[in-house]
Amino acid sequence: MAENENENGTAQFNPPPLPPLFPETYKLFGIEFAPKRLPLDRRMETVAVFFWISSFLFGGLITSTLMAYLFFFTRFWYVPIAYLTWMVYDLDTCNRGGRTGWIVDFVRGWRIWKHYRNFFPVKLIKTAELDRNQNYLLGSHPHGVLCSGAFSCFATDGAGFSTLFPGIVPHLLTLEGNFWMPGFREMLLGGGCGAATKRGMEALLGKPGGHASVLVVGGAPESLNSDKDKIKLVINRRKGFIKLALRFGVDLVPTFSFGEAHVYNLIPNPEGSMIRRVQDYLQNIVGFAPVLFTGRGIFQYNFGIVPRRTPLTVVVGAPITVEKVANPSVEEIANLHAKYVEELTALYNKYNPVYGDTNVELVIT
């Protein structure tokens, strides 16, 4: 598996070809079930994606329940005490640049992430070189339900980031609250993730060269958009990352995950509906809102929490040169923000006909 260059002059990491599909699905009580005969690799792909989504949704609860059981009902009461002590000690690591060293290489290299990549499948496309002696701030768009493409490309090495960008260590940034979830936090930290906070980003941007911080700019509000024919990016009011880029003098790199918006089916929640009003209220109160989505199951295709096999292509654009400004003015921030939006839009317009859907409109809000 090597870095190849296509007719567009872009480089991509090509996963191995998928095994042929077996169409012998069958229905029972109106539910479409998976074929009884499937290659082991495809079974492993489904298991890998189920592991990922269940870790996100239930990892904290499962770990907490296990620790409570060990404490109250077994002679291994010291295990949860030790882990809780460690977790309290380690709680702020996400704001100090995250984990480094062999543990990150180990977790990012798990074989399960190759199966995760092949499930969709996920492709990572390079359009320009990144200097291993510099730091970068990558903007990831759109958020989707759970950033499936960004997770594969930037929190694991399943999509071949280290092959396409040797010497660059990616750090996917996520809500600080995710690092308060026992068990699940270890997987995030092991993947090199950090907190999408001012302190967390400053710690990463201030490191010696060779680090790429990846911020999902639209955040939780962007995940609520359920339009089939539009991808609405929440970016016009997001200028904090622009200010940080100026302060640290790190180049900005727009990235776009084609197919991300269609991995799950969202329950319709148009502006003004009861569902959307509740979501917006929770967003304003606690910082995020529950996204109502449906996918497929492990053995059937009608409903469940497993995402659908939708090809995901994450295109990494060319760096936008940023000169260091210790105290950037409002005008300097606005100018760089406008340049970033312009480059992001150009990236979408160029590669959407190749990797996306020309019937889907990009809307900047």
Image (cartoon, helix red, strand yellow):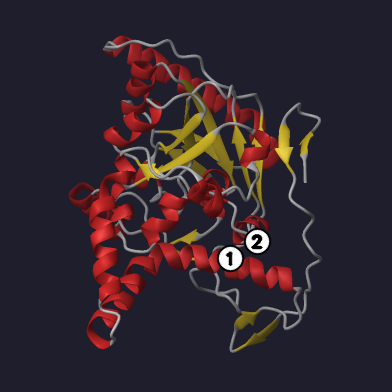
Q: Around disc 2, counting alpha carbons within 10 Å, would you say few (fewer than 14), some (14 to 19), or many (20 or more)?
A: many
Q: Is residue 364 visible?
A: yes
62, 238: nearer the viewer: 62
Please state if 186 lies on the left or on the right of 114 as rendered. left
Instruction: Tell me what residue is drawn at x 60 percent, y 84 percent.
Output: 30
Which is more N-terminal, label 1 or label 2? 1
Amino acid type of disc 2? His
Evaluate if marks 2 and 1 touch, with contact meaning CB atoms under 8 Å apart: yes
Amino acid type of disc 1? Ala
Instruction: Tell me what residue is drawn at x 64 percent, y 47 percent.
Output: 159
Q: Quadrant of residue 85?
A: bottom left
Where is residue 361 shown, x and y percent of the image?
A: 54, 38
The alpha-carbon separation of the residues under discs 2 and 1 comes to: 6 Å
Please state if 87 lies on the left or on the right of 21 as rendered. left
* Residue holding disc 1: 48
Where is residue 216 shown, x and y percent of the image?
A: 43, 40
Q: Is residue 226 visible?
A: no
Please state if 337 lies on the left or on the right of 76 as rendered. right
* Residue holding disc 2: 115
66, 254: nearer the viewer: 66
Note whether 152 is above or below 45 in the view shown. Answer: above
Q: Which circle marks residue 309 in the picture?
A: none
* Label 2: element kind: helix
* Label 1: element kind: helix
Instruction: Tell me what residue is drawn at x 27 percent, y 34 percent.
Output: 199
Where is residue 363 shown, x and y percent of the image?
A: 47, 35
